Amino acid sequence: MSRAMPRLFRRSGVALALSIAVNPALSADMDQIARGKYIATASDCVACHTAPGGAVMAGGLPLATPIGPIMSTNITPSKENGIGSYTLEQFGAALRKGVRADGKHLYPAMPYTAYALLSGDDVEALYAFFMNGVAPVETSPAETKLPFPFNIRLSMAAWNLLFLDNGPYKPDPAHDAEWNRGAYLARGPTHCGTCHSPRNLFMAEKTSSEMAGGDVGFWHAPNITSDANSGVGGWSVEELVTYMRDGHAAGKSQAAGPMAEAVDNSLRFLMPEDLQAIAVYVKSIPAAHDAVDTKPVFAWGSPSDELESIRGFALPQDRDKMSGPQLYDAYCASCHQAQGQGSFEGGLPPLLHNTALGRENSNNLVMVMLEGLRRQPDVLMPGFAKELSDTQIATLGTYLIQHFGNPAAKVDVGQVSELRAGTQKSMLVPAIRVAMVVGALVLIGLVVLWLRRRRNRAVVVQH
């Protein structure tokens, strides 16, 4: 047994139940299984394929999309309910082409467009790990039920023709080995673009706007291009590595929502040289600039408070009429301090120079106030969804932005209500349906025109 294998297993904190009773139909050694576990950890498979309180990799987690929730599947080696009957070729087809063993298409909520870049060796290692290193779970998640026409899985074949590139990743000779390793990891296993790249009408990543910012359910995955103001151009490679490893970088940002999950489940377990390679690659991505970002998103805010305006004044009987300073003093100041400077030892982050308040898109700020933040092993911010009304959240959010953030941003009651309810208005479904109706009418028109011409030709022949 090599020395590398135990190190990989020690580095992984993802709670995967290992049963190394090797499948006799599969020839896999411990090193290959360990490599597969490392790639699975880098790919953060556990985040989507494990429901809260559910068995690891057994699926059942509804993934929010603009066209409705997509249910993650059981990817344990259960032959009845999981992928235990998959051959290596079928596993590779699902992973890199989005086609299940039964021939049905997966939805690209499963980032097979990124996994298409995986090398053959990594696909084989993943297969060895899932077949030998994951405990089979005999549960079957609920089926995905999307509105018409998205419930027609065969339509994904056409989508794949348009938006699925054939892999695997080919190194760019214009860059060194470190950059290419970072490009492979960022574009492939860690699938950064799945969250951080905007999408077109057909929900495909806009490759021309790589990492320029996108939406993940009700969270916003920010611009991480090399732009100095809108992206991470003002971050050092070391700061990016620290952020990916620890979930925070002093004077810059702290992870929350899906990014916190990525750190806790995946990125913090990657080897330092891989984190370094990813950071080097990210720093090289062409800049995408938003005109509203007149200075770096982490550079906003200065210490200030309005304590004098609330001292000696009773709280209003109608709590929805509490002022921003009153709400801040009641719910924020004990941790973030009176002037937003954070705790002295840095354990509780400052609100100054914090990207959470520096972006025009304020969804993440609202989501953190509603849901709080819980990260391993001991990072905790309580959520206030049960304590504060939509009006109070909007008032507090506006106060935070005005004092510590980008004044171009705003928080309004409607936004808070929508995010609290877990609903988002999307024009995708009606737009696609309208397009289908228009297409059908055009097709009918062409058929009618063809029939008329055919009839006219028949009349001419008779004469």
Image: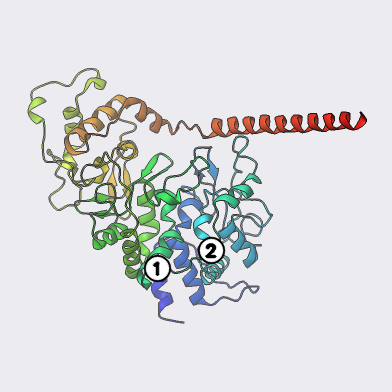
**Residue 131, located in which quarter of the rendered image?**
bottom right
Can you identify the residue that label 2 sits on? 167
Instruction: Kindly identify the amino acid type of the residue bearing the numbered disc 2.
Output: Gly
Image position, residue 195 (x, y; %):
42, 49
**Dot 2, how many residues are within 10 Å of its Cα: few (below 14), some (14-19), or many (20+)?**
some
Relative to 296, is 413 on the left or the right? right
Residue 180's mark? 1
Q: Are marks 1 and 2 in contact (CB under 8 Å)?
A: no
Considering every residue shown, the one lying at the far right of the view is 462
Q: Can see residue 15?
A: no
* Disc nearer the start of the sequence (1/2): 2
**Residue 86, located in which quarter of the rendered image?**
bottom right
Q: Is residue 239 above or below residue 369?
A: below
Check disc 2 and report its element: helix, strand or loop. Answer: loop
Q: Can see residue 177?
A: yes
**Dot 1, how many residues are within 10 Å of its Cα: few (below 14), some (14-19), or many (20+)?**
many
Relative to 372, is 27 on the left or the right? right
Q: Residue at x 16, y 41 (%)?
A: 301
Image position, residue 228 (x, y; %):
24, 51
Image position, residue 2 (x, y; %):
44, 81
Instruction: Kindly identify the amino acid type of the residue bearing the numbered disc 1.
Output: Asn
